[in-house]
Image (spheres, rainbow, N blue to C red):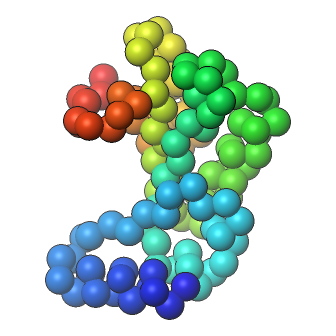
Amino acid sequence: MGFVTAISQRAQELRPGFAVLLQNPGNLIDNPRLRAALDGVARQDLLVGSREREAPNPPTEVAAGIAELTRARRHGLAVLVVEHVVDAGKAADIRRLLSDRGFLPYIAPRELDRLVPQD
């Protein structure tokens, strides 16, 4: 935890407003010392694509992920969720579902090789 705290403090010194996010936090989000060094968390493939491209994830996996990210929100952290879907209808549904939970949705190509404007 000391390493992340040191990075966060140094980044803020050099560039106020710099954000530190933890990717796929799991139970680490329950550590108050680590949380204090973070501005948010990020999660990829929360709803679709964890096993097969664009296929819905198992409901138990989705529920566990949402619970984890909801805990992060309750602790005041921003939550970014990256999903990879091509279908515009699916993308709109995903954006709405994630936004309704207070998460920041980002629909992107699987390769993550470019930024994509969001609707």
User: Residue 45: where, in percent of width, then height?
Assistant: 56, 36
User: Residue 48: where, in percent of width, then height?
Assistant: 60, 27
Examine the rendered structure and indicate whether residue 68 appears above or below residue 75.
above
Determine the residue located farthest toward the right in the rendered image: 60
Near-viewer residue (17 or 112): 112
Judge left or right: residue 116 versus residue 32.
Answer: left
Near-viewer residue (76 or 59): 59
Can the viewer see residue 100? Answer: no
Q: Residue at x 50, y 58 (%)?
A: 23
User: Residue 2: where, in percent of width, then height?
Assistant: 50, 90
Near-viewer residue (87 or 33): 87
Examine the rendered structure and indicate whether residue 32 appears above or below residue 72.
below
| Quarter of the rendering occupied by the N terminus | bottom right
| Quarter of the rendering occupied by the C terminus | top left
User: Residue 4: where, in percent of width, then height?
Assistant: 45, 81
Q: Residue at x 66, y 21 (%)?
A: 56
Judge left or right: residue 61 versus residue 119.
Answer: right
Q: Residue at x 25, y 30 (%)?
A: 116
Quarter of the rendering containing residue 7: bottom left
Quarter of the rendering containing residue 49: top right
Can the viewer see residue 7? Answer: yes
Number of marks = 0
Determine the residue located farthest toward the left in the rendered image: 14
Judge left or right: residue 49 versus residue 9.
Answer: right
Examine the rendered structure and indicate whether residue 63 appears above or below residue 58.
below
